[in-house]
Amino acid sequence: MSTDTGMAYTTFNRNEFDTFSQPMFFGELVNVARYDQQKHKIFENLIEKQLSFFWRPEEVDLASDRKDFMDLPEHEKHIFVSNLKYQTLLDSVQGRSPNVALLPVVSLPELETWIETWSFSETIHSRSYTHIVRNIVPNPAVVFDDITKNEYIVRRAESVTRYYDDFINLSNYYIQLGEGTHTVNGETVEVTLRELKRRLYLTLVSVNVLEAIRFYVSFACSFAFAERAKMEGNAKIIKLIARDEALHLTGTQHMLQIIAAGKDDAEFAEIARECRDDVVAIFTEAAEQEKGWAEYLFKDGSMIGLNKDILCQYVEYITNQRIGALGFEPVFPARNNPLPWINAWLNSDNVQVAPQEAEISSYLVGAIDSEVDTADFGDFDL
Amino acid sequence: MMVSAKAPLIRRRRWFPSRTFYSAAQTEMELVGGGSTQLEMDLGEPAPQNRQRIIPAPAPEPADQGDLFGYLAESPEPTPQIEFDGMAKPVFAVRLADGREARFQHAGSLLESLESQDIHIEYQCREGYCGSCRMKLREGHVHYTTEPMAWIDDDEILPCCCIPVTPLLLQ
C-alpha cells in the first residue's frame, strides 16, 4: 500500500488481502467492516461490553445536587467545579482524538469499530458534564469558558494532547507524501514509518495514563462528596463514567501489550522495547502533575474525608498499579490503597439498573426465549 | 402448498392459559384500611372507612444485620439441591506468598472467598474487564466462570471471575 505517493487514504480499500496477516496499524486500510474474521477477538468483546453499558446523562436525577451544591462551603465548591472542568477537558480530547489519530492508520475492522465505539462513549461523558453544570450554576458558560483560560488546566492539557498532536502531524505528512525527506512550505520534514510507530506507541501510553491515572483524582473527590451524602446524583454519573473508563483502559492495555509482545509487527515490538524509559517518564510526569493538581484543589482547605496528602498517596498507589499492569516495575514506594472505600464506588455491580436488567449485565432488547425442553414436545401428535 | 397426504400431521403446541401468581401482599385480607379492593367494588358495597381487622401479628423476625463478619460468601447457600453423602463440595486450600491462608468451598468466586476470610484484594469491576484484582498464580489451576476481558499475563489470574480447581498458591 505504501507507494511513492504515500499511503493515500481511501475510504474503501479495493485491495484483496488476508485480514489475519494484517497488523493493528499501518497495514492495509480497512475495506469491508466485517466481523466474521477477527484477528484480535478481544476488541469485539470490548465493543459488546461497551454497548451493553450504554447510558444517557438525563437518566440520572440531579435535583438534590443543586441544593447540596449551594450549601457547600466555598473551598468545596472550588474542588467540585475544578474537577468538573478538568474532566470536561479530558473527555473533550478523548471524544475526538482516537478517531482523528488512529482511524486513518488502523488495519483491522474490529479494532476500527472499537476505536469508534470508545470515542463515542466519551462524547456521552462530555454531554453529562453539561448536564451537571447546567444543574448547579445558572450560567454554564462561567464554568466552560474558564477551561481554556485556567493555567492549572491548560498546563495539563498541554501534556495530555502533545503526543496526539505530534503523531497526527507526522501521520498527515505520511498519508500525503509517504516516507522520505520532503520540503513543505520551505521546511524539511523527515517521514519514516519507524518514527511514526514510535509516536503512535507513545500516544497510546499517554492515553493509557489519561484513563488510568488522570481521571482518578476527580473520581476520588466525587466519591468523597457522596460518602457524606452530598452531590450524590453527580456521583452516580461519575460511577457510570468510571465503569466506561475501566473498559477503555483495558482496550488500551491490550493494544500496548499486543504491540509489546510483537504479535503482529516485529518492528513495533522493538520500538516498544526502546521506549521503556519514555513510558516510565510519561507515567511519572502524569503522576507529578496530578499531585500538583491535588495541591491546587485543596489550596483553600481540605474536604471532609480527603486531603492533599491522602490524594497524593492515592495517585502514587494507582500509578504503581497501572504501570505494573503493563509489565513495568513500580515507580513509587509500594503502599496499600490509602482510599480503600473507593473500590465500592468504582464497582459497577452497584450501578443502579432497571429490574428487568438486573439479572444480566447486557440486557438484550426484544430477546426471544429460544430454550427448548423435551416437555415442549409432549403434546405433538404424529 | 406441497403437502403430501401421507405426511404425518404435526399439530402446533396447544395453548395453555398462563398461571397467575399472587404475592402474599395481594390477598384481600392484607389490604388494610384506605384501599377498596376490586372484590368490594363488584359487590357494590362501599368499604367501611375504619374497618377493624384482626391481622395476626407477624412473627418477630431477627433483625437483618447484614453480613457483619463477612462469612456469608464462604457459607453454603440455601439450595433445594439434594445433598448426597460423600458429595460435599470439595475444599481447596488457597495460600498466599506472604503466608496468609484461606480455604475455598462455597463462594461464587475466588475474590469473594478471600474477602470473606479477611484477605482484601484490590477490585473494581468484579466481572473480569478492569483487571484491578490481577494476581500471580504460582501453583495450581483455576477455572474461569466468566471469560476474563482484561489483559492478564500467562502467570496471572483474575480472582473476581474464577474458582480454584486445585489447591492454589497466589502472590
Image (spheres, grey):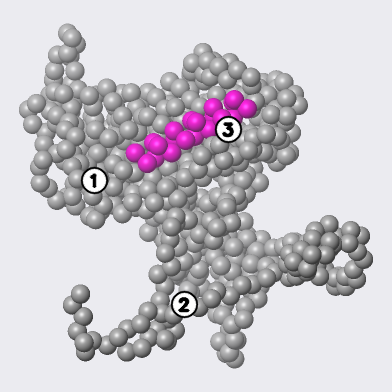
Magenta extent? A116-135
Q: Amino acid at mark 2?
A: Trp
Q: Is residue A209 visible to the viewer in this orientation of the structure?
A: no
Which residue is tagged 3? A218
Q: Chain for mark 2?
A: B
Q: Name the quarter where the C terminus of chain A is drawn.
A: bottom left
- At 12% from the left and 48% from the top, the residue drawn is A17
Q: Chain for mark 3?
A: A
> In the rendering, which numbered label is found on residue B15?
2
Q: Is residue A140 visible to the viewer in this orientation of the structure?
A: yes
Q: Amino acid at mark 3?
A: Ser
Label 1 close to label 3 by CB (< 8 Å)? no
Q: In the image shown, does B63 or B156 lie closer to the viewer?
A: B63
The image shows residue A164, relative to residue B2, as above or below, that is above
Residue A125 painted magenta: yes
Where is residue B65? Give x, y as percent.
78, 62
Which residue is tagged 1? A33
The image shows residue A129, relative to residue A107, as above or below, that is above
- At 42% from the left and 86% from the top, the residue drawn is A379
Residue A10 painted magenta: no
The image shows residue A275, relative to residue B136, as above or below, that is above
Where is residue A66? Give x, y as percent.
69, 29
Q: Chain for mark 1?
A: A
Q: Are marks 3 and 2 on the same chain?
A: no
Q: Residue furthest left?
A: A4
Q: Is residue A323 left or right of residue B103?
A: left
